[in-house]
Image (tube, rainbow, N blue to C red):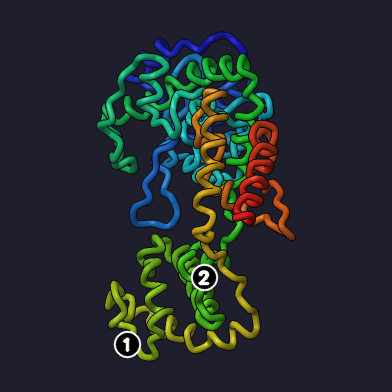
C-alpha cells in the first residue's frame, strides 16, 4: 500500500500532540497532508442537551505526529474540505458513523475515500462492531485506558490526560488500516469493504430533514386509522422541525412513546393532554395548543394528503423460513471466516421477504453488490424451496 506507518512512533507523540488553533496553521497542515497516502481522523463532541452535535475536537494522525484541531477557535475550514475531496488521500476512521455525521454538519462534505477499521474487522472475522480498545489490543497487543470516554471536550484547557486519550484515538489507526488492507486484499475482500464504506457515506446525509417520514419508524402503529396515522405523521414532523429550531433532543419536545399516547388517547383539551402518560406540565404549557391543533386538523390532513402506510411486521409464519435463511447465511459466513452480521443483517431478510410479487421474490438493494455474488442467489433458491414446502403442508 505504502511505507508502513510506525504506530509506536505515533504513540510516543501522544503526550505532546500538535495543537492547531488558528486558520493559518490548519491551512499549513492540510496542505502538508494533501501529499500523503492516508491520514487518520476522529472527533470528540457533546450531544447531551442539543439536537445538533457540538464539536469539541478533531483529531488527525499522519506519518509523523498526532494533531488536535480546536473547533472552538478555527473559523475557515475550506482547507479541510479540500482535504476531504482529495481522491488520492485515504481517510481512516473507526466506527465512523457519528464522525461522518458531524463532518457533514460542520462542512457539508464527507471524507472520501473513506476506510472504517471497525467494518474491516468484521470482514476479517476479528469480531463484529468491535470497539477501538478491543481492536487495538487484538491487532497490536496494546491495552488502552477508557478513562476519558465521558470527558467534557468543550472545556479549555483540556487536561493532559484528555489530550493523550484524544491523540491515541488516531495514533494506531494508520497501522491498523495498513494491516487490514493487506489482509483484505489477500482474501479478495477489499472491494467489499469499499462498497460498505460507500454505503455508509451515502446514508449519512439526512434525507428527511422535515421529518415527514419519521412516523414510519413506529412499526407498532401500523394498524392506526388514516386520521390517527395523519396525526402521528404531522406531530412527528412538527417535533422534528421544533427540535432542530430549538436545538434540543427530540425527547425534550416529546418522547416517542408520548407521541403514541397522544394519538391513541386523542385529548381535546389541555387538561386532558396533561393526563397523557409521561407528558410534562412544561410541555403542555409551551406546546399544548399546537399539539391539540394537529389533532383537530388530522381528518382534513388525512384527506388532503393520505399518509403512506406503515409496514406491518412480518407474520409469525415467517419465523421458521427466516431461521433457515439465517442458518444458511451463518454457514456461508463461517466458510468465509467473516462476522455473520456483516454478511446478512436482519433488515436484509425483512426486505427480501417484502419483495414478493405474484409469488416471486427478488433481491432488495441491500443485497446487491458483493452480497449478491456471495449469498444473494443462494438465499433466493432457498427461499423458493421453503415457500414451496410451506404451501404443500
Residue located at (44% from left, 65% from top): 243
Image location (x, y in percent) of residue 281: 27, 78
Residue located at (56% from left, 46% from top): 104
Image location (x, y in percent) of residue 190: 63, 23
Secondary structure at numbered mark 2: loop
Residue 190's disc is none
Residue located at (53% from left, 87% from top): 297
Vertically, is 53 above or below 92?
below
For the question of whether residue 25 can be seen, the reply is no
Vertically, is 210 above or below 137?
below
Instruction: Give the crowd class for mark 1: few <14, some 14-19, many >=20 residues within 10 Å.
Output: few
Looking at this view, name the residue that lies furthest to the front.
393
Of residues 153 and 18, the one nearer the viewer is: 153
Disc 1 target residue: 272
Residue located at (38% from left, 16% from top): 11
Disc 2 target residue: 222
Of residues 78 and 323, the one nearer the viewer is: 323
Amino acid at each position: 500500500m505504502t511505507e508502513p506507518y510506525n504506530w509506536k512512533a505515533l504513540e510516543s507523540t501522544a503526550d505532546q500532540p500538535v495543537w492547531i488553533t488558528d486558520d493559518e496553521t490548519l491551512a499549513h497542515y492540510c496542505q502538508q497532508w494533501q501529499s500523503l497516502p492516508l491520514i487518520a481522523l476522529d472527533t470528540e463532541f457533546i450531544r447531551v442537551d442539543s439536537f445538533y452535535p457540538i464539536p469539541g475536537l478533531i483529531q488527525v494522525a499522519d506519518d509523523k505526529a498526532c494533531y488536535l484541531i480546536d473547533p472552538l477557535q478555527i473559523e475557515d475550514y475550506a482547507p479541510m474540505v479540500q482535504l476531504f475531496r482529495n481522491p488520492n488521500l485515504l481517510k481512516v476512521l473507526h466506527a465512523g458513523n457519528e464522525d461522518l455525521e458531524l463532518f457533514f454538519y460542520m462542512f457539508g462534505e464527507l471524507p472520501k475515500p473513506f476506510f472504517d477499521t471497525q467494518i474491516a474487522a468484521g470482514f476479517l472475522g476479528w469480531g463484529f462492531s468491535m470497539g477501538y480498545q478491543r481492536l487495538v489490543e487484538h491487532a497490536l497487543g496494546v491495552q488502552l485506558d477508557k478513562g476519558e470516554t465521558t470527558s467534557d471536550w468543550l472545556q479549555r484547557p483540556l487536561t493532559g490526560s484528555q489530550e493523550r486519550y484524544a491523540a491515541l484515538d488516531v495514533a494506531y489507526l494508520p497501522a491498523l488500516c495498513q494491516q487490514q488492507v493487506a489482509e483484505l486484499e489477500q482474501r479478495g475482500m477489499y472491494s467489499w469493504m469499499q462498497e460498505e464504506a460507500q454505503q455508509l457515506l451515502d446514508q449519512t446525509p439526512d434525507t428527511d430533514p422535515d421529518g415527514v417520514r419519521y412516523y414510519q419508524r413506529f412499526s407498532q402503529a401500523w394498524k392506526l386509522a388514516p386520521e390517527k396515522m395523519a396525526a402521528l405523521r404531522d406531530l412527528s414532523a412538527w417535533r422534528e422541525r421544533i427540535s432542530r429550531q430549538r436545538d434540543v433532543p427530540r425527547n425534550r419536545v416529546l418522547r416517542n412513546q408520548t407521541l403514541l399516547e397522544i394519538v391513541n388517547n386523542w385529548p381535546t383539551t389541555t387538561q386532558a393532554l396533561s393526563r397523557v402518560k409521561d407528558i410534562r406540565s412544561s410541555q403542555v404549557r409551551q406546546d399544548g395548543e399546537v399539539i391539540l391543533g394537529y389533532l383537530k386538523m388530522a381528518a382534513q390532513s388525512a384527506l388532503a394528503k393520505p399518509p403512506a402506510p406503515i409496514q406491518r411486521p412480518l407474520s409469525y409464519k415467517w419465523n421458521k423460513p427466516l431461521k433457515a435463511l439465517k442458518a444458511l447465511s451463518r454457514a456461508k459466513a463461517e466458510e468465509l471466516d467473516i462476522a455473520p452480521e456483516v454478511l446478512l443483517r436482519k433488515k436484509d431478510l425483512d426486505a427480501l421477504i417484502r419483495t414478493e410479487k405474484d409469488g416471486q421474490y427478488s433481491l432488495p438493494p441491500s443485497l446487491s453488490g458483493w452480497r449478491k455474488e456471495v449469498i444473494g442467489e443462494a438465499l433466493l433458491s432457498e427461499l423458493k424451496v421453503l415457500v414451496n414446502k410451506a404451501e404443500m403442508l
